[in-house]
Image (cartoon, grey):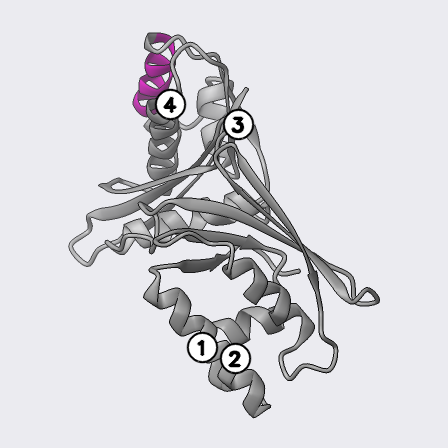
Amino acid sequence: MNHAFVDASWHELPDGRGVGGWGLVLLRPGTLPARFQGQLEAPDNNAAELRAVLEALRHAPDSQPLSVHTDNEAVIASVARGRGPWLLADAAREVQDEAEARDISLRVDYVTRTRRHMQDAHHLANDARRGLNTPGLDAPHADVLIEQRHSVPQARVSLRRGSERVTAHVNLDLLSDVPPSAQALLAAVTLALPGETLLVRRASKIAQALWQRPERALLVGAHAQLTQARQAADGQGVLVQFQGVG
């Protein structure tokens, strides 16, 4: 089954019009997550949320089941139960018609915004509402998972792009000026291809902070290594986005 995590953002303008943004993370078996976003005029947030569900259908493969995950109860009531606010009736009918036309068996259920892909959809929607494109959205992506235990001087870095999977076991130098968690992150970045966006999970807060601002490093050696790594990544067009804290 295909899965879509959707969210929306909405704001009322001084002239009374409403502007919204929708965000969507689409998961299909055997592929990397696909991310989409868009801006729209909408009367309220619920309407923008329903648009996100509609876009999930439009981007999903035909004739395959689709499970849409949202944190909006009005959307679930309107699409899944047919008992939502009357103002959403037309939009809910458009969603149902799209599912029927595409021969998609649609399921809509609730998930908290704290879920990883829901957080991504939330950021996509907010950026779209503000008229911004999420950095790296159209670039090639690779998912990276960093696994590290405080008592073990080794980290495991796993990278997935399409059908390719790469796993590296990184020996951590506990005497280095660079903190162990930042060493693991630097090792992960070396696995990137030119022009690729790395979606990194479980990087520590320290590693994230030092990557984003190497000048925060207290030791000169760490500052130098982190700055060099950032410059090398920037030169290759590699973008690092963090998807959660380890």
SS class of the residue under badge 3?
A: loop
For marks 3 and 1 on the same chain, the one whose residue lies earlier in the sequence: 3
Q: Confirm or deny contact between disc 3 and disc 2 (CB under 8 A).
A: no
User: What quarter of the picture does the N terminus occupy?
Assistant: top right
Residue linked to disc 1: 228
Q: Amino acid at mark 2?
A: Gln
Q: Which residues are magenta?
A: 89-100
- The percent coordinates of residue 241 (x first, y second) are 46, 58
Q: Gap in Å between the C-alphas at discs 4 and 3?
A: 19 Å
Residue linked to disc 4: 57
Q: Confirm or deny contact between disc 2 and disc 1 (CB under 8 A).
A: yes
> Which residue sits at x=15%, y=54%?
15
For marks 3 and 2 on the same chain, the one whose residue lies earlier in the sequence: 3
> Which residue sits at x=67%, y=81%?
176
Q: Gap in Å between the C-alphas at discs 3 and 2?
A: 36 Å
The residue most toward the left is 15
Side (left or right) of 238 relative to 117? left
Side (left or right) of 157 relative to 239? right
Label 3, residues with CA under 10 Å away: few <14, some 14-19, many ≥20: few
Task: Name the magenta segment's main secondary structure.
Answer: helix
Q: Amino acid at mark 1?
A: Gln
In this rendered view, identify the residue nearer to me: 8 or 142. Answer: 142
Seen in the picture, residue 101 relative to 40 is either above or below; the reply is above
Q: Nearer the viewer, mark 3 or mark 2?
A: 2
Regarding residue 143, the answer to whether it shows in the image is yes
Q: Residue 41 is drawn in which quadrant?
A: top left
